[in-house]
Image: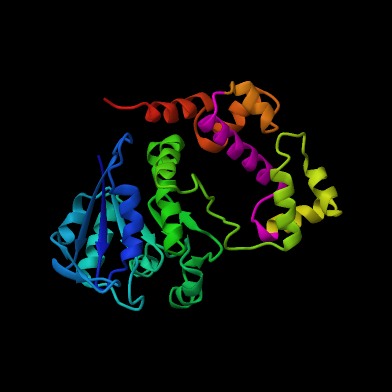
Amino acid sequence: MHRVVALVRPVQSTFELGCAVEVFGTPRPGIPQHYEFEVCTEVPGPVPTSAGYAMSVARDLTALASADTVLIPGWAPVEAPLSAGVRHALLGAHARGARLVTICSGVFALARTGLLDGRSATTHPGRAAQLQREFPRVRVEPDRLYVDHGDVATSAGAGAGIDLCLHLVAKDHGAAHAALLARHMVMPPHRPATSTTLRPGPVALDDLLEWADERLGTPLSVDDLAAHLSVSPRTLARRFADHLGTSPGAWLLSRRVAAARALLEETDLPVEAVAARVGLTSAVNLRRRFRAQVGTTPGAYRRTFHAQRRPTS
């Protein structure tokens, strides 16, 4: 079992902590439990929360010594310094190979360890300027939902913490398992690190995306998208880069793969038929594109979902 230990402090945000608990610490019927979840604090005992109540935390910083993932679910106030004990525990966990993960303002604590110097990180857009000002050696990317370097990872606002946690589950146990967990949480199965929610596009581009989504099963091309907006493919590419952080071709492919995932989950159509319905023309092409984006084959992805649907005795 992979041990996830959340480091909390007064006054602890209940939502940021709850995001981590939902992904790593909540047993769900029919879904394999791959994580152990625990909470620790520097001084065990009652820890005040942002909701007005105190929670009882029994474990101290020694819990971090055996963690596979150390999670900092917010840090309030963000100006609060690290004590010598917390700094030593975080650096010690990182030195022995633990993954350090922050949600929202938790990045301020991680930045104070020096582990983000010379690296990119993100936080809530409302705190991005402050983070950059206080830690000029950190490359702050306010348009990212999360940034994952492998050994350290940061997320934007609290909701983006769920995206980061699901991303880590996919890395640890595969995209199909992460998608199954997200489905049980009634969450989108995946939002890429660069999200359109942080960089809204103009109305015309929104209309184009809706128009294209309705025609995924047709031989839709980037030239067709440009023609629909009456712009050149080069202008279209620039607008996608500016507002969506991706290319028209990459966006179109991601939507086709997402549509294929839905069909694999919800129907028993043969893979060849799924490929045709989402505009990927052949089962071979679907398998290649699906593996590249989801990390598994269409057949394995479908089997995972169907196996979990079977009633247990």
Write the residue at 69% across / 56% down: 241
Determine the image quadrant of residue 81: bottom left
- Quadrant including the N terminus: top left
Looking at the image, is 248 positioned above or below residue 51?
A: above
Whole-percent x and y of residue 307? 39, 26
Q: Nearer the viewer, residue 145 or 225?
A: 225
Based on the picture, tell me whether residue 111 belongs to the magenta stretch: no
Q: Is residue 279 left or right of residue 120?
A: right
Determine the image quadrant of residue 199: bottom right
Question: Coloring scheme of the render?
Answer: rainbow
Whole-percent x and y of residue 203? 73, 62
Determine the image quadrant of residue 57: bottom left
Provide the residue span drawn in magenta.
Answer: 242-268
Q: Is residue 74 left or right of residue 190?
A: left
- Quadrant including the C terminus: top left
Looking at the image, is 188 positioned above or below residue 123?
A: above
Write the residue at 33% across / 36% down: 31
Q: Nearer the viewer, residue 210 or 170?
A: 210
Q: Nearer the viewer, residue 95 or 191?
A: 191
Looking at the image, is 237 positioned above or below residue 274?
A: below
Write the residue at 85% across / 48% down: 227
Q: Is residue 165 left or right of residue 120?
A: left
Most prominent secondary structure in the magenta stretch?
Answer: helix
Based on the picture, tell me whether residue 264 belongs to the magenta stretch: yes
How many marks are shown on the rendered structure? Answer: 0
Whole-percent x and y of residue 310? 37, 26
